[in-house]
């Protein structure tokens, strides 16, 4: 029984990572769509200069932000190993990001790798901050 509870914590942390990446994707799509509509363009224009530059910036910063938020959340739900749980959140987000990037024409560029490294730091930071409040 206790082993199942421990395993479910790690799976939940990984799931939070997937959720962090999905939240990032939704945020990028929403912001690009709102900008496009406000500018009088089509509902969503992923080829515009705004979508290219700001979509990448929001994806990088937003990805780290959401990993931090979900890592901090999961770390508040576990009794120990806060930083490790935060890193598992980051790994879940990174896995989904890499899986999605493999099908993209750009594959993994330096910015995408940098974004994933930033997610690792954000996950560890979220766990560490939660451990300070435990």
Image (spheres, rainbow, N blue to C red):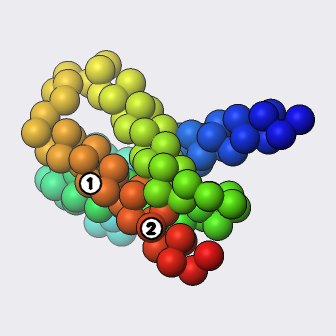
Q: Name the element at disc 1.
A: helix
Residue 102 on image: x %, y %? 29, 20
Q: Pointer 1: what residue?
A: 118
In the picture of the structure, the residue carrying the numbered disc 2 is 128
Outermost left residue: 110
Of circles 1 and 2, the one toward us is 2
Relative to 49, 128 lies left or right:
right
Categorize mark 2 by other alpha carbons within 10 Å: few (<14), some (14-19), many (20+).
Answer: many
Q: Quadrant of residue 3?
A: top right
Task: Name the image quarter holding residue 33.
Answer: bottom left
Give the quarter of the figure containing the C terminus. Answer: bottom right
Give the mark nearest the N terminus, 1 or 2. 1
Q: Nearer the viewer, residue 29 or 107?
A: 107
Left or right of residue 18, residue 3 in this image: right
Helix, strand or loop status at disc 2: helix
Taking the spot 62% from the left edge, 58% from the top edge, the residue there is: 80
Residue 65 is situated, as x and y percent measured from the top left of the image, at 39, 64
Residue 26 placement (x, y as % from top left) = 48, 51
């Amino acid at each position: 029984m206790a082993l199942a509870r421990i395993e479910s914590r790690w799976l939940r942390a990984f799931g939070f990572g997937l959720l962090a990446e999905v939240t990032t994707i939704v945020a990028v799509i929403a912001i690009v769509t709102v900008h496009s509509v406000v500018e009088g363009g089509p509902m969503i224009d992923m080829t515009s200069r705004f979508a290219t530059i700001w979509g990448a910036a929001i994806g990088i910063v937003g990805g780290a932000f959401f990993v931090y938020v979900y890592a901090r959340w999961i770390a508040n739900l576990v009794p120990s190993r806060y930083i490790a749980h935060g890193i598992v959140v980051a790994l879940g987000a990174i896995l989904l990001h890499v899986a999605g990037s493999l099908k993209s024409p750009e594959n993994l560029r330096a910015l995408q790798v940098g974004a994933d490294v930033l997610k690792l730091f954000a996950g560890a930071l979220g766990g560490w901050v939660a451990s300070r409040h435990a």
